[in-house]
Image (cartoon, rainbow, N blue to C red):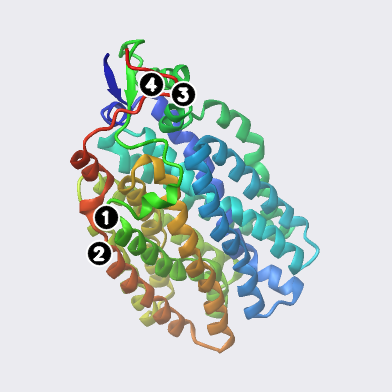
Amino acid sequence: MNHLNVSDYIAKSDFRRFHFILLIIGFFCVIFDGYDTAVFGAILPPMMKEWHLSAVEAGALGSYSLFGMLFGSITFGVLADRFGRKRMVAATVVLFSLFTALGGVASGPKLFGLFRFMAGLGLGGILPNAIALLTDYSPKKTRTTITAIVMCGYCLGGMLSPLIGILAIGHYGWRFVLWMGAVPLILLPLAYRYMPESSFILLREGRREALLAVLARINPSATIDPDVQFVEAHEVSERIPLAGLFSEGRALSTVMFTAAIFFHLILGYGLINWLPKLMLEAGFTMNSSLMFLVVLQCGAIVGTVAMGYAGDHFSLRRILAGLYLLGTVTMILFALNRNPTWAYVLIALAGVPVVGAQNLVQVYMSQFYPAFVRSTALGFSSSVARIGGMLGPILAGWLVSMSFSIHSMFFAFAIPGVLSALAISVVRQSCASDRSRGAQGRLGVPMIGEMEK
């Protein structure tokens, strides 16, 4: 009987219409993930004024969605590796869209905090699954570039929040910015129709015709023997995905990935949530302060695409270590800067490591781990590291309440970059999925009910 290794077939494919549609769907999902994640920073100043919040109270409120992400990342990551990424992508989009919009009708901080926690569950779960699904089906020669382009949607969403805030808050109030978060609920049915399920899930569930249909979309000109036996490089019936993160020598790398994201999220979420407020304190107007978030995300888009292209040709680990150190350098330069024009330039440059590196590390992880634990790996590391994301806004709020100057704040933001660079440098590339696959050989995994003839 003929055998067809599904992962190898997909990896050797060319970029076609199927991949373009998947890219558009992923881009759509990630845009609104970025929008809903950054929306708190855009509405923070007017919300603090309306509800008479102190800096510490506002910082705590900003951490509620991050607390939800902590649970959402690991929960939906594990569920996706057991029951399918397509279903979990849809579930997470519904969660973060619905509860972000409901935040716009909250009567006070307590109800708003609850809604942000619920939205955080979806926000934490969408990226691990969207990135894993893209990695499942992308051609190997352009895998990093494709995923990096989709991750630019996160930056674009992060730009839309302050832009809509600039245009709408003065006329319609800060709640309108939250209501815009409901847009994905309208478009989700169409996206769900064209979204494929992961090949290893179709293989595990014995959905032979569905898998053949997906492979035909990947390469319409190819002819697949109807009697072919599909095989995979890894055992797709794995029941405990978490165990796969610490097997085959991946334990140390899992810990280091988590540490790198942890320290980086202290910087990322602390800066994104507090940048408009810090710029207001520095003497900029409300609109100018929000524009800093736009400039930050512009730098992130350029950096993500450029680094994604570089990642298809050079070591992602080395690129990431350099980006983390660049984050430290830009924060130090910003702390020393006294020129308003250079402030915009430095913030644009900071967008490359502050946001772009966070995008790229998830791309790296999606390629490092085998398919059957890909969502779990992204979800686990993101979930544990979210504690850093929660600490970022709280620590920034505490520093503001202690009357730290804006320049001292940026000196503090410089520290996490060094720690992230050290952590990512310890990741053992020799244990990456592509290399371990070659070493261990290929396991024939018949579909359910399929017997050798």
Q: Earlier in the sequence, mark 3 or mark 4?
A: 3
Pair 1/2: label in front: 1
Distance between mark 1 and mark 4 Cα atoms: 32 Å
Comes first in the chain, label 1 or label 3: 3
Kind of residue indicated by mark 4: Leu
Image-quadrant location for residue 23: top left
The Cα atoms of the two marked residues, 4 and 2, are separated by: 37 Å
Residue 425's disc is 2
Q: Residue at x 73, y 53 (%)?
A: 102
Q: Which residue is mark 3?
A: 206
Is the Cβ of the residue at disc 1 closer than 8 Å to that at disc 3? no
Q: Counting other residues with Cα less than 10 Å from the Cα at mark 2, is it few (<14), some (14-19), or many (20 or more)? A: some
Type of amino acid at the residue the image marks with label 3: Gly
> Spatial distance from mark 3 to mark 4, Cα to Cα?
15 Å
Task: Give the label, 3 or 4, closer to the camera.
Answer: 3
The residue sitting at 25% across, 57% down in the picture is: 317
Task: Evaluate whether residue 341 shows in this view.
Answer: yes
Residue that mark 4 sits on:
215
